[in-house]
Image: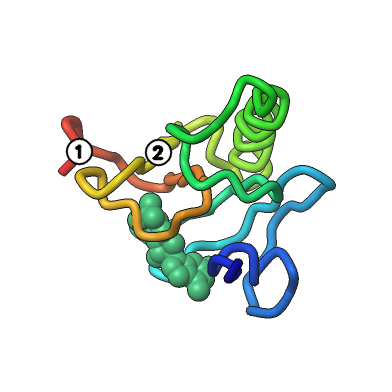
Amino acid sequence: MTKTLFEKIIARELPATVVYEDDVVMAFRDINPQAPTHILIIPKKPIPRIAEAKPEDSQILGHLMLKAAEVAETLGLKKGGYRLVFNNGPDAGEAVPHLHCHILGGRHMNWPPG
Ligand code: 5GP
């Protein structure tokens, strides 16, 4: 099976500015930032999207969420706040079929999102 873009980043076959990594997740800067701070945090396990996650992935997903908060705090976003986004499927604009959580912060954000 061909590797997704993010699997290539995990394997260090493509460069990325990594801000956090452990055995389960990796967080790196988005190449096309939509906010002053824009990080993607991904599981190392290639789960395509949240709709494809299985009950046995719950520990990975819980870890990913807690680490997202930790990364946001480390990058100075806790006080001002930040947004976590999972795009799932075509209507949401999902472009890379490897589950990823966007961490967006450093500016005020509108609601509803576009
Ligand atoms: P999606 O639209 O699937 O939710 O988000 C995919 C994200 O991956 C986009 O924000 C896009 O800018 C980012 N992205 C695409 N290619 C690369 C890449 O090669 N490196 C990094 N760091 N981010 C990428």
Tell me which numbered mark, 1 or 2, is placed earlier along the sequence: 2
Does dot 2 land on a helix, a strand or a loop?
strand
Q: Is residue 107 above or below residue 73?
A: below
Residue 6 at what x, y percent from top left? 58, 63
Name the quadrant where ligand 1 sits: bottom left
* Outermost residue, front side: 1
- Residue at 65%, 45% in the rendered image: 43
- Residue at 65%, 35% in the rendered image: 64
Q: Is residue 43 above or below residue 38?
A: above
Quarter of the image with the N terminus in it: bottom right
Residue occupied by mark 1: 113
Residue flagged by tag 2: what amino acid is it? Val
Please indicate, yes or no, whether residue 35 appears anywhere in the rendered image: no
Residue 28 at what x, y percent from top left? 61, 59
Does dot 1 land on a helix, a strand or a loop?
loop
- Graded by Cα atoms within 10 Å as few (under 14), some (14 to 19) or many (20 or more), the crowding at tag 2 reads few
Residue 54 at what x, y percent from top left? 59, 27
Residue flagged by tag 1: what amino acid is it? Pro
Quarter of the image with the C terminus in it: top left
Q: Is mark 2 within 8 Å of ligand 1?
A: yes
Q: Residue 7: which quarter of the image? A: bottom right
1 and 2 marks in contact (CB < 8 Å):
yes
- Graded by Cα atoms within 10 Å as few (under 14), some (14 to 19) or many (20 or more), the crowding at tag 1 reads few
Residue occupied by mark 2: 85
**Could you tell whether 112 is left or right of 44 in the image?**
left
**Could you tell whether 60 is left or right of 69 in the image?**
right
